[in-house]
Image: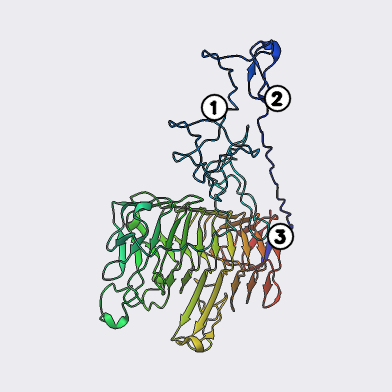
Amino acid sequence: MKTSSFSFLIASVVAVSLSVSAFACSGEDSSTDPEDGVGVEDGGGLVRDAGGEPERDAGGEPERDAGREPERDAGGEPERDAGGEPERDAGGEPERDAGGEPERDAGGEPERDAGGEPERDAGPGTSDGGDSGVDGGSGPDPVDAGRADAGTDGGASDGGLDAGQDAGPVEVPTDGGTVVTGTLSGTLTVAGSPYRVIGNAQGVVTIPKGQVLKVQPGVILDFKGRPEVTEADVAAGAPDSVMNHQKGRVEVRVYGGIQVSGTADKPVLLTSTNPYGWWGMNFYGDNSVGDGHPVFDHMVFEKVRKNEYNGDRDWTRGALWAYYPGPVTIRNSVFRDNVSAAKCGALDLMFTVGSRVEGTLFEGNRTSDIDRFAQAGTSSMAGGGAMCVTHGRDSVVRGNTFRNNGLEAFRGSVWSGLTVRPVLAWPNSQNIYDLGGGAALHYFQPNNDLIVDNLFEDNFVTKGPAAAIYVEDVGTRGVTLRHNRFLDNQAGAGGVVVCNRGSGAVELVVESDNVFSGNTVNGNPAPNVTGDCTVAAQ
């Protein structure tokens, strides 16, 4: 490797805990100056005049201050929240309205938060932050649930869903819902959820050209397909039978627009109750452009099984295959338990321009290449255990966690008799490129792409290069790595980051604030960066 001023500095990540002082009302706080002549509150809540006598209202009754009497509904009962308890402020006191009593709901019960506790206000001088997916300083930066966080987001949305935290599985209700066969369009609401997506006779459901699918918070899409259908039910030459040869797995084809708009407490779930999974979501280049750029916010995307397909290998790239010549936006989401056979276990951004993946967790995804016809001594070209950027440019991968994603290859047709195959490395005797590698990320022909503030932890590639990131066929300053953490990743060759087939200039920029610790190659300490690219350190 050629290296210009190549050095790394172990960076310390300092967690800053912001303590907000709660402000509780007291008699002293709400009193006014006696010299003002406008009244003073005593310990019992009476407002007294400058002479010490209670002020009285028009009916002759003592007047009380705004912090003592309950706010009551039209029936005279105190308002309560949904749990029956008074709503409390940040100091633990019941939150009071202009009349001084806890606010209550229409049924007379106090409102409670998601954890069952009375909802409390933020206290004077603070903001409740609204949705924690909104940036701009309104809420705390995410903190990884395990290791120290990969870093700050540099001004991007920090996401209500921490990139290092997963809320766990969500049960799909067994009753109710809406059955979907041929098309998905319009607005999906909680009232119609769960949406049980079966697909047409070929196991395909389409977002049509000229239409936009909008998915509201809390919606569940169960890509159930038709698990009862087997290969024996379909003629071998049946056209477009993507699903029917794949144990009933259903595929989503996107020709129109899609806007997935979950929230931190009500993410949108894309899953499958089919024991064989589903075939994922696919875009089709220019055919998918024209109805607004795709946006996925606060989404959980899981249980795709894009394998065992003996046709075009593009069908087995990425659980979400975004072949889209424009920007794709993914924020505050989770990709988990997805498997692809060719490359890019969870996500492939192909030919995209200006895409952003931020505040998202990639965990437990696999690229698992099983070739039943492979001969001994041959190698696999599988790559990208979690994600790929393929022929893309100007992408930003920021503030994400890549944990326990893997890349593996086998030969054989019986699970009990599979043999591990190596992943093809560069250079090779066949002069083959478009290679594999990269336990978490794989970049092919990158152009001005940024990888910043991410955590790469416990990812692995079996008998292959790049314990975290593989970069290939790179132009000048094709990829920049800034302020990332690489912890306990494993590979069978190369280093943590591998860069090959550069253009002859500086192709890879690795800034000094990246942290490498505990990474291994075949059980030995792993080099941070290997390959034949020229690397600049800044």
Kind of residue at badge 3: Phe
**Disc 2: CA contacts within 10 A as few (<14), some (14-19) or many (>=20):** few
Give the spatial CA distance, label 2 vs label 3: 63 Å
Q: Secondary structure at mark 3?
A: loop
Answer above or below: position of 297 versus 407.
above
Residue sitting at x 50%, y 64%: 169
Answer above or below: position of 427 versus 138.
below
Q: Secondary structure at mark 1?
A: loop
Residue 382 seen by the camera = no
Image disc number at residue 98: 1
Give the left or right position of residue 417, taking residue 403 as reference.
Answer: left
Q: Which residue is mark 2?
A: 28
**Disc 3: CA contacts within 10 A as few (<14), some (14-19) or many (>=20):** some
Q: Nearer the viewer, residue 185 or 65?
A: 65
Kind of residue at badge 2: Glu
**Residue 138, quarter of the rendered image:** top right
Give the spatial CA distance, label 2 vs label 1: 18 Å
**Disc 1: CA contacts within 10 A as few (<14), some (14-19) or many (>=20):** some
Answer above or below: position of 384 versus 162.
below
Q: Which residue is mark 3?
A: 6
Q: Nearer the viewer, residue 445 or 116?
A: 116
Give the spatial CA distance, label 1 vs label 3: 64 Å
Give the left or right position of residue 2, taking residue 422 as reference.
Answer: right
Q: Nearer the viewer, mark 1 or mark 3?
A: 1
Q: Earlier in the sequence, mark 1 or mark 3?
A: 3
